[in-house]
Image (cartoon, rainbow, N blue to C red):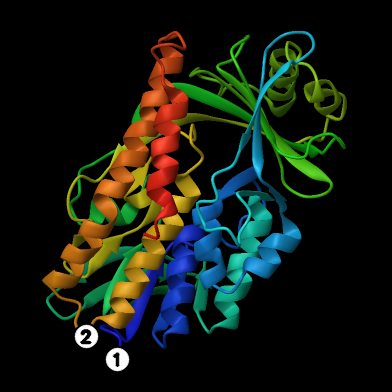
Amino acid sequence: MPAVSTALVIGSGASGCAAAVLLAQAGVAVDLVEARPAPSTTGSGITLQGNALRVLRSLGVWPQVRASGYAFDSLGIRLPDPSATLVAELPDVHTGGPDLPGTVGMSRPELAAVLVARAREVGVALHWSTAPVALEPDDDGVDVQLAGPEGTTGKRYDVVVGADGIHSWTRRAIGVDTEPRPVGMGIWRVHAARPVDVVRTDLVYGGRCHIAGYCPTSEDSLYAYLVEDAQDRSGLSREEQLAVFRDLASSYHGPWDAIRAGLTDETPVNYARFETHLVDGPWNRGRVVLVGDAAHSCPPTIAQGAALALEDAAVLAELLTTREAADDALWAAYTERRLERVRTVVDSSVQIARWMLDHTNREEADVAGVAGRVFELVTAPA
C-alpha cells in the first residue's frame, strides 16, 4: 500500500506531470494545479538524453516521444571558420541503456502536450488557472488553500509536491531561502525549419558567441541557439530580437547558412539568462517536497536539466508508492538518492560555463572529462 493516498502537485512542467502520472499509476488520487490557463504552447526545443528517456518510458509515453521527436546517437564539433570544419564526431553515451537512443530532440510544447495527455489518461485531475496561496503542513498531511476561477477553496492532502519551477512559490512558502543566481551567460533560441543535413546536434565553440548549436526536434523542425555573455535584452521588440539573432548567426557557416536562410519574420525567438541554484539539504519540509527546477537549476552546458527533473519525480514517486509511511526515513532516502547526484551535475555544468566565460584555454578546460564523468554517473539508474 502506498505511503500516501492523496497528493497535490503544483506545476505542470515535466517534473510535475511526471510525478503526477507515476503517483496516479500506483493508485494515488492526484490533483495537479497550474497557474497558467492551459498547457504551454510556446518555447523552442528540448534535448532529452537517455536517462530522461528512461523516465519517460516508465510514464508510458516513450512511443509518443519517439514519434514526435528526432532521435540521434552522436554529437558533432565544428570550428567557427568559413567552412564550419567538422573536427570531431563523438558517439553519444546511452545514459538510458542500450535499448534507448542516446538523445532525442523535441519541441517543448509537443512534450508538454504528451505529458498532459498522459496525466489525463491515468486519472490525474488537472486544474488550470489555479495556484496555492497558503500551505499548512502537519505530521499527517498538508492543508492547502487554492485560488482558482471559482474563488479560493481549501483541501487537505497527504503530500504536496512543489514542481513550480526555478522561481518556485512552494520553495519560498516552506521557508527555503535558496534563490537562483546569475551564471553570466544569456541564450538566444529560435524554432525553425530543419535543413536536410541537420541530423544531430552540432556545436561550435567560439567565434562571436561562446556556443553556437542546433538540435533537430522532428523531421521538419529544429531549435538553434547562440550563447553569449548575459545582457539586458528586455527592451528589444521581437523584430529587433530576430535581427540580433540573424546578425550573430551570420558568423557561423555550414548548416548554419541554411538555418539562417530559413528564418522568416514569423520565426519564434526568445532570450533568457542562465541562472543556477541548488537547495543544499533536505528538499522537503514535512510533507511538502520539491522536485525539478524548484530544487535545482544549472546552465544547459551538459543538457541534463530535464533529465534531472524527471529523475527527481521518478525517485520521489517510487518512494511514496513503495514505502509504508511518509516518515523521516522516506525523506532521508529521497535526499540521499538525489542530492549528491544532482550536485555533481549542477557543479559540472557551472564549471564548464565558467571556463567559457573566462576564456580558459583548452588544455586547462577539461570539458570532455567533466562531461564524461557526468554521463558515467547518470547512466546508473537514479
The answer to whether residue 180 shows anywhere in this view is: no
Using the rendered view, name the quadrant where residue 309 is placed. Answer: bottom left
Name the foreground residue: 168 vs 342.
342
Q: Residue at x 40, y 30 (%)?
A: 370
**Viewed as shown, does residue 319 lie left or right of 366?**
left
Mark 1 and mark 2 lie on one chain; the one further toward the N terminus is: 1
The picture places residue 68, in percent across and down from the top left corner, at 74, 59
Name the disc covering residue 89, or none.
none
Quarter of the N terminus within the rendering = bottom left
Question: How far apart in space, not on screen, are marks 1 and 2 (Cα)?
Answer: 7 Å
Question: Which amino acid type is shown beneath numbered disc 1?
Answer: Met
Disc 1 and disc 2 in contact, CB within 8 angstroms: yes
Question: Which amino acid type is shown beneath numbered disc 2?
Answer: Glu
The answer to whether residue 32 shows anywhere in this view is: yes
Residue under circle 2? Answer: 324
Quarter of the C terminus within the rendering = bottom left
Q: Residue at x 36, y 25 (%)?
A: 351
Residue under circle 1? Answer: 1
Residue 257, compared with residue 309, is above or below; it is above
The picture places residue 36, in percent across and down from the top left corner, at 53, 58
The picture places residue 9, in percent across and down from the top left corner, at 39, 69
Residue 335, compared with residue 79, is above or below; it is below
